[in-house]
Structure formats: structure tokens, C-alpha cells
Image (cartoon, grey):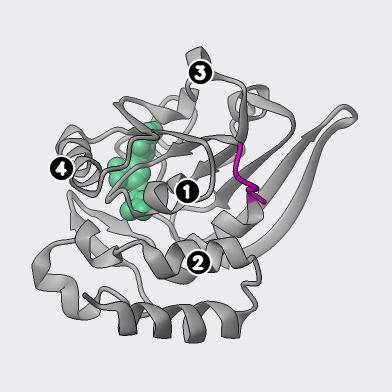
């Protein structure tokens, strides 16, 4: 179902906007994005926008999922941490591209629903936990990639600490309603920071993020 829509999404929203990593394009051609949202939204599932998933949260626009995934430069054998599971779509795309995905969601209700979707689709390399992802997942560190799909006021130091040498962190950082996407590479000489694209994400709420009532 929706194969045609998925192909058009890859061609016009991703390739035409210079997403070039063939593995990323292939994964997004494969993962059934509509199954990560309510059936009432299926007619818009492959359109060029973020969509609501309940609890005031959103599933990111396909282009944003693609560019963030591409920045992680996955080859297949990596261990990746995602903060902000939400619908689970981004985690599923990652699961197609690396060895193991660890993902943390702070809202229990979303996490429960998403866990069922992972089970139904047969993803066995995704581990989902409920909690505050701003402290990372120290028991499972180091990670070859960390992707934060909610916006932080600044780059939490713990993420860099939990990266392997050469590992990459992709994170939107900035103000409450507008941010810049950054890639931070951990090297022996210290973190290298690259600026990607302006973006808008829901807030990362927690100890090293925004406070609940801000
Ligand atoms: N990657 C998701 C995007 C979800 S939106 C997808 O593909 O659908 C961002 C998510 O981050 C929301 O579900 C929100 O509840 C969650 N979030 C915000 N702060 C968090 C924190 N400190 N730890 C874990 N999840 C958090």
C-alpha cells in the first residue's frame, strides 16, 4: 500500500533536494510511514510536512528525517541512540541502516503505542525505553551516532561524552520556535561542529533541555 506515494516522496522531496545517500533513500522508500500515524491522516502521510501524533507531539517532515539520517553517515554496523521516539518512524528508518537502535521517549502513552508498531512490523533491533533522554543512555554508551529529534536550548555535554571516537551527534539547537540543525563529530582533538539547516522541532524537555513550563 502507498508504494507509489512513497516513490514520489523520495523523488520530489528528497532527491530533488539533494539527499544523495542511496541507503537512506532506499530505507525511506521501504518504511511504511503511514503505519506510524493515525489512519485519519493516511491521505497526508507522504506529503511534505510534519503531522500530529497526539500528546502535542509530531512526526517530522520526511525531508528532515532524511537529512538528519544522512548526517549520521551510517554504513550498517553502528549502534545508534535516538532521543524522542515519538511515532517511531525515525527509529524504524535508522533500524534499516544500522545494527542497533536505542530510543528514549518521555511520554509513556506514546511509547506504548509505538512499541506495538515496532512489534507488528517485526523490528527486532530497536530497544525502546521511557525516560528523560537528556541524560542519554549511559549503560549502553558509547554510541556511533546520537540523533535528537526534539529541540534543545544548547548542546548537552552528556551526548558528546556518550559518543565513540569519530561518532556523530545530530541535534536541533536554538530558541523555542526556531532552531538550527547541527552535526557534532567527536574527534581526539575535540568536538567538530558543522551547521546544517534551519528547522523547527518540538522542545526537548528534561534535566539538560527545556523545563516543563517554559
Ligand atoms: N522521532 C520522532 C519525532 C517525535 S517529536 C518521530 O519520528 O516521530 C519529539 C519527541 O521527543 C516527542 O515525542 C517528545 O515527547 C519527545 N521528547 C521530548 N523531550 C524528551 C526527553 N527529554 N526525552 C525523551 N523524549 C523526549
Task: Say whether residue 75 is magenta.
Answer: yes
Please report the bounds of the magenta region as a residue range: 72-77
Residue 40 spot, x, y in % from top left: 9, 71
- Disc 3 packing (10 Å; few <14; some 14–19; many ≥20): few
- Relative to the observer, which residue lies in front, 22 or 206? 22
Residue linked to disc 3: 140
Q: CA distance from mark 4 to mark 3?
A: 24 Å
Q: Which mark is residue 26?
A: 2
Task: Say whether residue 142 is magenta.
Answer: no
As drawn, 136 above or below 191: above
Identify the residue shown where x is 32% and y is 59%. Answer: 59
SS at mark 2 in the image = helix
As drawn, 109 above or below 142: below
SS at mark 4 in the image = helix
SS at mark 3 in the image = helix
Q: Comparing marks 2 and 4, which lies closer to the viewer?
A: 2
Q: Picture quarter containing residue 124?
A: top left
Identify the residue shown where x is 52% and y is 49%. Answer: 97
Q: CA distance from mark 1 to mark 2?
A: 12 Å
Q: Earlier in the sequence, mark 2 or mark 4?
A: 2
Q: Earlier in the sequence, mark 3 or mark 1?
A: 1
Q: Picture quarter containing residue 89?
A: bottom left
- Say left or right for 5 vs 117: right
Q: Comparing marks 1 and 4, which lies closer to the viewer?
A: 1
Residue 53 spot, x, y in % from top left: 20, 57
Residue linked to disc 4: 113
Residue linked to disc 1: 94
- Relative to the observer, which residue lies in front, 16 or 211? 16
- Relative to the observer, which residue lies in front, 24 or 139? 24
Q: Earlier in the sequence, mark 1 or mark 4?
A: 1
Amino acid at each position: 500500500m502507498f508504494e507509489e506515494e512513497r516513490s514520489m516522496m523520495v523523488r520530489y522531496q528528497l532527491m530533488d533536494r539533494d539527499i544523495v545517500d542511496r541507503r537512506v533513500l532506499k530505507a525511506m522508500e521501504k518504511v511504511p510511514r503511514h503505519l506510524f500515524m493515525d489512519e485519519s491522516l493516511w491521505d497526508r502521510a507522504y506529503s511534505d510536512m510534519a503531522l500530529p501524533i497526539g500528546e502535542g507531539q509530531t512526526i517530522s517532515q520526511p525531508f528532515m528525517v532524511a537529512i538528519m539520517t544522512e548526517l549520521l553517515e551510517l554504513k550498517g554496523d553502528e549502534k545508534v541512540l535516538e532521543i524522542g521516539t515519538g511515532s517511531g518512524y525515525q527509529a524504524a528508518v535508522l533500524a534499516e541502516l544500522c545494527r542497533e537502535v536505542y530510543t528514549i521517549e518521555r511520554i509513556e502513552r506514546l511509547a506504548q503505542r509505538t512499541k506495538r508498531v515496532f512489534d507488528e512490523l517485526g523490528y527486532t533491533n530497536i530497544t525502546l525505553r521511557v525516560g528523560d533522554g537528556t541524560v542519554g543512555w549511559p549503560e549502553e554508551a558509547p554510541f556511533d551516532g546520537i540523533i535528537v529529534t526534539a529541540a534543545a536550548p544548547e548542546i548537552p555535554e552528556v551526548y558528546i561524552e556518550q559518543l565513540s571516537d569519530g561518532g556523530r551527534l545530530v541535534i536541533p539547537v536554538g530558541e523555542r520556535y526556531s532552531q538550527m540543525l547541527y552535526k557534532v563529530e567527536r574527534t581526539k582533538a575535540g568536538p567538530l561542529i558543522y551547521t546544517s539547516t534551519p528547522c523547527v522541532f518540538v522542545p526537548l524537555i528534561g534535566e539538560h533541555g527545556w523545563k516543563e513550563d517554559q
